Image (spheres, rainbow, N blue to C red):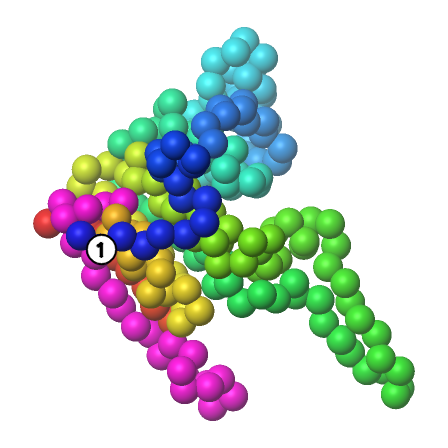
């Protein structure tokens, strides 16, 4: 099988660089639509060191820590994973606006810099290492009969397909769906690719 190689995929001894596996505890920051009794029960369970029920949770954090923290409890249990990773556009998502002839630049906040930037220190190599580590951890979370959907565009879609093929091997089917954006303002080559990986 053909293999996609990038700087950082292998260490100096020729071994693949594994994803970081630091399992940090989760802390509930906010719960939506929860009664006072349910909230108190959750707090009591947390205080006694017992995990509250895993349901309807939105987890905020860096995926390299979040995915690793999910592994002990959820390995092989996810029936569906959908990810919308960065498209490697090189954008930092600051923007310029003119008001009364004067130009202003809206710089991203600290949170926006972490959450939305699409710039990579070592360029494509660091993006591919980030994507590879993400897919490896998601594969471990995925149930045998589960499916994963990956949404990307033309910037790195072809590389992502090669990484998915490597991680999921021949055991699963990697199916590509190309979605065309129906807006005249968007160039015709701006298609969005989605891959579905599911058992045969």
Residue at 38 percent of width and 23 percent of height? 72
The total number of labels drawn is 1
Q: Is residue 177 left or right of residue 187?
A: left
Q: Residue furthest bottom?
A: 184
Relative to 62, say whether 75 is above or below: above
Camera-side residue of 77 and 171: 171
Magenta span has 40?
A: no
Residue 171 highlighted magenta (yes or no): yes
Q: Position of residue 35 (x, y in %)?
A: 55, 31
Q: Position of residue 65 (x, y in %)?
A: 52, 33
The answer to whether residue 107 shows anywhere in this view is yes
Towards the viewer: 2 or 190 = 2
Q: Is residue 99 above or below residue 24?
A: below
Measured from the top left, where is residue 39 in percent x and y?
Answer: 57, 26
Q: Nearer the viewer, residue 51 or 104?
A: 104
| Residue found farthest to the top | 48
Residue at 31% x, 29% y: name it. 75
Q: What residue appears at the point 66 percent right and 65 percent down from the top-left corner? A: 93
The part of the chain drawn in magenta is 167-191
Is 174 left or right of 71, judged from the image as shown? Answer: left
Residue at screen point 19% across, 37% down: 144
Circle 1 residue: 2
Q: Is residue 66 visible?
A: no
């Amino acid at each position: 099988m053909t293999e996609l190689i990038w700087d950082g995929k292998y260490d100096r001894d020729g071994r693949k660089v594994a994803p970081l596996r630091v399992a940090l505890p989760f802390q509930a920051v906010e719960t939506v639509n929860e009664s006072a009794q349910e909230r108190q029960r959750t707090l009591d369970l947390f205080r006694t060191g017992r995990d509250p029920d895993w349901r309807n949770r939105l987890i905020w954090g860096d995926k390299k820590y979040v995915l690793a923290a999910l592994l002990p409890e959820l390995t092989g249990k996810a029936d569906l994973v959908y990810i919308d990773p960065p498209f490697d556009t090189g954008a930092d998502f600051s923007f310029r606006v003119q008001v009364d002839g004067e130009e202003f630049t809206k710089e991203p906040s600290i949170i926006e810099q972490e959450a939305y930037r699409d710039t990579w220190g070592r360029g494509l190599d660091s993006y591919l290492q980030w994507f590879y580590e993400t897919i490896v951890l998601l594969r471990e979370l995925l149930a045998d009969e589960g499916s994963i959907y990956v949404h990307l565009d033309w910037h790195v879609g072809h590389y992502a397909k090669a990484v998915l093929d490597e991680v999921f091997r021949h055991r699963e089917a990697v199916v590509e769906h190309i979605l065309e954006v129906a807006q005249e303002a968007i160039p015709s080559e701006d298609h969005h690719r989605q891959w579905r990986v599911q058992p045969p």
